[in-house]
Amino acid sequence: MSHEFLHLLEIVIASSLINNFVFTRFLGLCIFFGVSKKTETAVGMSITFTAVMMVSAAASWIVFNFIMLPLHLEFLKIVVFIGVVAGLVQASDTIMKKIAPALFHKLGVYLALISTNCIILAVPIICVDEKYSFLEGIALGLGSGLGFALALILMASLRERLELANIPKPFRGLPIAFIITGMVALAFTGFSGLIAE
Amino acid sequence: MKNEIHNSELVLRGLIQENTIFRQAISLCPAIAVTSTVKNGFMMGIAVLFVQVMVNVTVSSVRRYIHPRIRLPIFMLISSGWVTVTDLCIHAYAPDIYAQLGLYIQLIVAFASILAAAESFASKNGIVASLFDGIGRGTGFTIALVAISAVRELLGKGTILDIPVLFGSKPLLIMVLPAGGFITAGFLMALFNYLDDKHSKKAAQCR
């Protein structure tokens, strides 16, 4: 039991720090650069992301293993996962509106945005490609979400300070954000030795 | 004749004014992820070009039959269909490239640029115009990817298309690492901004 738990923990750490989605797998960059201008939005976004990632990893695992595998429909996985994720996001949007309107007002905008995001779609696809079990899939979702949150909040606080800096004109805005991300990514390569192969 | 000028303008717009990577800054993920060698960058660009053109043409040919309220799910469905086609083709005919690009080719489906083109252009315009719009955007994307990957391969490995170009110098490992991708893209974007700025100033003076 404890061995299994350790294995899950390993997946969480590996997917959040070593294979950080933003810095080493380069996913979710549009959102990453889009919402990392203010720390407050970054926090809201990362909470929503982590939750949706875990739920969508679980849901698509069930769909894949209980519906698509028995019917030999593996080649449809892209189409189906997009549908599952979009439906799920839509559902949580509606449920949140009814149950927690205050929370909906804070996070509702992000929910609509993330249904077509590559980072959300990547979790189920990686899950299937690596043949993860149900719990491993959820661990991957959690770890990736946490990693994305870490990257987003780091970047947002850096960019808030950057507003005050005197940057050459062609570099203003996105270019300097890219270069800074490069620096942070370089720092993140330091994590690659964290788990022994 | 008039129509032709119109079409070439559409291509140019996708190439420069609305360049997906440098201008609109969307669909950035593959721009960094697969650009460690020119070959990968080029293949990815071609895959996106194909999907973009096919989605544009499909959306524009069925645009009259789609109810506006459900148009986004339909667009997603169309694009995921074409992405699956591309994915399976590359898997079958170029397995070695697929091994490196696989995940990112499947994720073309989540590209904002493809959906944006379908929504803002193809759903309102004719098939031929949409075709050229798709070609412009796709080519602009390919050029951006090739530019980034050329810089990275040259500095990171000292080669272009696996042909050694830089002799007697040590390659910079950082350029092939993820970090190098971000930094290269940042500098190229800045260069694009700078040239664009200069160009528009010159145009203003001419007038």
Image (cartoon, coloured by chain):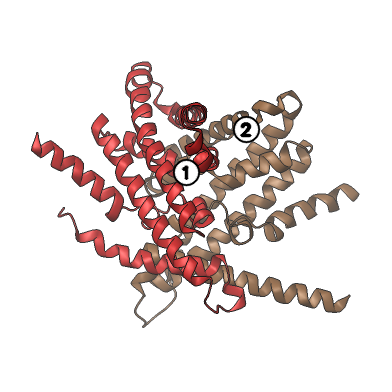
**Image coords of residue B75 (percent x, y):** 62, 33
> Label 1 is found on which chain of the structure?
A
Element under disc 1: helix
Q: Secondary structure at mark 2?
A: helix
Q: Nearer the viewer, residue B21 or A170?
A: A170
Q: Residue furthest top?
A: A71
The three-letter amino acid code for the residue at tag 1 is Cys
Farthest residue in the left direction?
Answer: A2
> Which quarter of the figure has residue A66?
top left
Residue B43 seen in the current view: no
Q: Is residue B71 above or below residue B179?
A: above
Q: Which chain is brown?
A: B
- Find residue A194 and report its horizontal and vertical position in percent: 19, 58
**The color chain A is rendered in:** red
Q: Residue B58, how many percent across, how many down?
A: 67, 32
| Residue receiving disc 1 | A118
Is B68 placed left or right of B108 in the picture? Answer: right
Residue beneath the point at 44% across and 30% down: A81
Q: Residue at x 34, y 21 (%)?
A: A69
- Crowd class of label 2 (few under 14; some 14 to 19; many from 20; radius 10 Å): some
Q: Nearer the viewer, residue A10 or A70?
A: A10
**Vertical order, B168 against A102 (above or below):** below
Pointer 2 residue: B72
Relative height, residue A161 to residue A10 (above, below): below
Q: Quarter of the image holding residue A112?
A: top right
Q: Quadrant of the N terminus of chain A?
A: top left
Q: CA distance from mark 1 to mark 2?
A: 16 Å
State which chain disc 2 sits on: B
Q: At which x and y percent is residue B135?
A: 68, 48
